[in-house]
Image: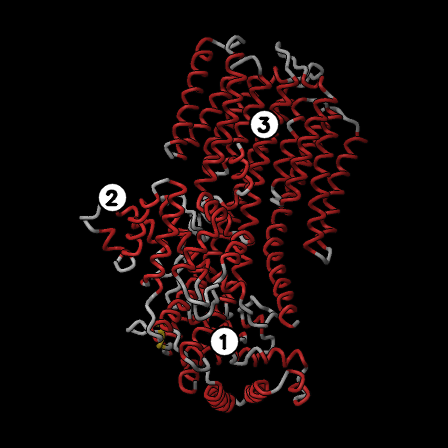
Amino acid sequence: MENMQSRINTSRELENFRKDIELRYLKKHSLFVLSLIGIIALPVIFMLNTFGFSTHVLFLYAFFFFAILVINLAFFAYEDYFNSIKVAMYINTLGLYALSASLIIDVKSPSLYISIFLVYAIVSLYQDAKVNLLNNIAVFFLGVLAISNNPMIFNLQSQNNISITYIYLFLLVFVFLISIASTVFIKRKAKFIAKLTEIQEIEVRTLDTLFELETLYKGKKAAKSKSYFESINRFSDVFSKDYGMENAIKSKVKVIKDLEQMDIKEVQEKYPNYSIEEVKEIDNLRLNRSRKIRYIAYKIGLLEDFLIPKRDVYSDTRFTTLRHYEDNRHVRIIAFVVLYVLLRLDNPIFSGLSDMEVKEHIMSSELIHLIDADVLNVYLENSEVFDRIFKDIYREEDVK
Amino acid sequence: MKNLYRKLRNSEFLSLTELLKTKIVVVLIFLFIFGLISVPIAVFEGFSFDVRLFAPISFITLFLISLIGLIINRVRLSMHSTIYSIIALTIYYTESAYYLYGFLLILISLTVMIFYQDLYTYVVYGGGLTIYGLFYISIRGEALLALHEDNVVLSNLTYQFMLASFFLVYLLYFILSDNIYSFLSYEYLRKNEMVKKQRKYCLKYLNEIDEKKGRKPIYETVEFQKTVSEIGVFINEILEKRGEKILETIEFYFFLHKQNIETVLNSPSATTLTKKYANQLNKYLLSKDNEIYAIQFDLINKYKSAYSEHNNRYSTRIDEIFKDSSNRVLALLIIYKTLKSEPILYDKWGQIERSYSHDEIIQLFQNKEIREFLTYEDIKFFLKHQQYFENYL
C-alpha cells in the first residue's frame, strides 16, 4: 500500500515537473502571441479607416482587440496559471479566426483572404498539440467557407479568369504541408519534454541502484554516522564559541540521532518545540542511503571532470537507440541479440526476464521504436525459436 | 505510402536524417503531382518563349537531382534541390498571366521551406523569396485587385503586409523552436551525463562483484558467445538467406572486446571495411558503458522499488529543501564530510577507493555545475570558513 502511494506521489511530482517545463514555454509563447495581436491591431484599424468604414465599425474592431487584451490579462492573473493560459490560448485562436472571417466578409478583397494564413502562423506560435489541431481544422474550414461564400472576391481585374478549384488546391497543399510540419515539431518537442521528465526519475533510481551495488560490493553501510556527527559537533562547538553564537547545530544532531531509532511522530513528541514539518525537514539530513542529503552529496561528488558534450546539443546521438541510421544490418542484428540475451540473464541486482516478459516489455515501451523494424519482426514472429536457443545453451534450472 | 505514413506518425523516433528524408519524399510527391498538373497545361498559356522553355527544363532537372540525391543519400543536396524546384515553379507562374496563382505559389514555396524546419534555409531562401514577392506585388499589384476594388495602393500594402508578416511570424516561430530545442537538449544532456556517470560506477561494481566471485565477464563466456551467434545466424537466415554470413561480424564483435578500439581504427593494416565495422560495433561493446546497458538499466530501474522519499523528489538545491538556516548549514557540513570521507573517486589503480581532499572540494565548489545544489551564499559561507571545515570535519 505504502509502495503504491509512493508511486502515485512520484508520478504526481513528475507530472508537476512536466507541467513546469510546459508552463515556461506556454507563458513565453502566449506573450508573443498577445504582442502580435497588439501589433496587428493598428494596421487593421488604419486599413479599415482607409477603406472608408464608419466610426461605428472601427469602434467594434477596436473593442475586439481591447477585449482580447483584457481577457488575456484576466487569465494571466488567475491562480491556476497552467489551465487558465490554456483557456486563453483557445479564446485567442477562435478570436483571431473570427477577426479574419469578419475582415474577409466586410472588405471583400482577395488580399484579405491571405489573412487566414497569417492567423495560422500566429496561432502556431503556441506550439501546443490541441491548439495545433484546432488551428488546422479552422484554417481549412474558414478557407473553404470564405471561397465558397464569396467566390466573387477572386474575380480579378486581370484578363485571366481565376479557377476557384486552383484556390482550393492551394489551400489544401498549404494545410497539408503546414499541418505535417507543425505536428512533427510538436511531437518531437513533446518527446523531448517527456524524456527530460523521465530522466529525473531515472537519475534518482540509478543512484539508488549505485548505493545498492556499493553496499553489496563493500558489504557495509555506506556512511558511518557516529564519526560524522562527532566531527560535526566538534565543528559547531568551536564555531559557535568563536563567533559567540548559540549552538543550534548540536540540538539538531540530537534530533537526527533520535530519528535513526524512532519515527517522526515520536521524535516530535519528544521535542515539542519542533513542528512535524520541521522534524520532517531534519529527517532529510539523516545519512541513511534513502535520504536526500546523501543523494545530494554523492551527486556533487560525481561532478569531478563533469563535461557536457555541447556538440551533441544539435546532434542525433542524445537519445538511446539501437537503430542508428548509419549501422549495417549485421550490426543492428548483433545489437538486438546482445540486448535480448542480457535481458534474459540474472545479475546481482536483476532477475532475468522470461521470453514472454522480454516481448511484453518491448511491446509496451518505446523500445519498439528503437530496434530495427525487420529484426524486430523476425523476433516477434519467431520468439519461441529465440527462447529455445537460449534455453538449450543456458541449461541452468533457474533460467525462466 | 503505408511506410511513409508510419514514419510520419512515429516521427519523434526518427533520427534527424531519417526525418529529413521522409520530408523530402513528401515534397517530391507534392512536386511531382503539381508539376504534372501545371507544367504541360501552362506551356500553352501566356508565357514568354524563354520562360516556356527554361522553367519546365529547370524544374524537371532539379526534380531529378532531388530524386537522385535522395537515392544516393545526399539528403541536404536533395532538400536544397526540392526548394530550387519549387522556386522554379513559382517563377514560372509569376511570369505567367496567372498573377494570383503566382502570389499563392510564393506562399506555398514559403510553406515548403517551413516544412523543412531549418532556420538558415528559411532565412536565406524564404527571405529572398519574400523580398521577390514584395517587388512582385509592387509591379503586378493592379492585376491582383478584385473587380469591385479601386484602391490599388491599399490593396498592395495589404498583400505586402500579409506576406512580410507571414514570413516574420514564422521566423519568430523558428527562433523560438530553436531556443526550445537547444534548452531541452542541453538540459537532457546534462542529466544524461550524470546518469551515464552513475551507470559507469554501477558497471564497475558489477564487474568487481563478478571478479570477487571468480566469474568471467559475461561477453567472455562461451554460453553468451554461442547464444548470440546462433540467434544472430537465425535472424540473418530469414533476412538474407545465407545466415552464416553474419558469423564473421559476430566473431569480430567479440574480438573487439579484447582490443583497444583506437588501435584498430588507427591501424594501417586494417581495411576501410574493417574500420567501418569496428566503428559501428564500438557502440555496443559490453566492456564499457553503452546504449545496451542504458536500456538494461532502464529496465532494472523500472522494476526496482525506489526509495520512498517523495517530497521535493527531484530538487537538489539545499535552499529549496531546507528552509531553516541552521539545517542548511548542517546540510553543508554533511556534504563536506561525505566528500572528504566517502570513497567516490577512482584511485590510480582504477578502484573507487579515493575521497576528495580539502583543496579538491574547494575546486569542486567553484565548479559551474555546483549551482544546481548550492546557492552563492552557501559557497560564500564555505569559502569564508573553510579553515573550520578543514580542521574539524
1 and 2 marks on the same chain: no
- Element assignment for label 2: helix
Q: Amino acid at mark 3?
A: Val
Q: As rendered, which of A187 and A38 lies closer to the eye? A: A187
Looking at the picture, does residue A185 appear above or below residue A344?
Answer: above
> Few, some or many C-alpha atoms within 10 Å of disc 2 (few <14, some 14-19, many ≥20)?
few
> Few, some or many C-alpha atoms within 10 Å of disc 1 (few <14, some 14-19, many ≥20)?
many
The chain carrying label 1 is A
Where residue B183 sits: x, y (%)?
Answer: 50, 52
- Element assignment for label 3: helix
Q: CA distance from mark 1 to mark 2?
A: 49 Å
The chain carrying label 2 is B
> Few, some or many C-alpha atoms within 10 Å of disc 3 (few <14, some 14-19, many ≥20)?
some
3 and 2 marks on the same chain: no
Q: CA distance from mark 1 to mark 3?
A: 58 Å
Where residue A180 sits: x, y (%)?
Answer: 57, 36
- Foreground tag (3 vs 2): 2
Q: Amino acid at mark 1?
A: Arg
Residue beneath label 1, please?
Answer: A294
Q: As rendered, which of A178 and A82 lies closer to the eye? A: A178
Residue beneath label 3, please?
Answer: A173
The chain carrying label 3 is A
Q: Amino acid at mark 2?
A: Thr
Q: As rendered, which of A179 and A69 lies closer to the eye? A: A179
Residue beneath label 2, please?
Answer: B272
Residue appearing at x 64%, y 72% in the figure: A2
Q: Earlier in the sequence, mark 1 or mark 3?
A: 3
**Left or right position of A394 against B266:** right
Residue appearing at x 55%, y 89% in the figure: A250
- Element assignment for label 1: helix
Looking at the picture, does residue A231 appear above or below residue B100?
Answer: below
User: Does the rendering let one see residue A242?
Assistant: no
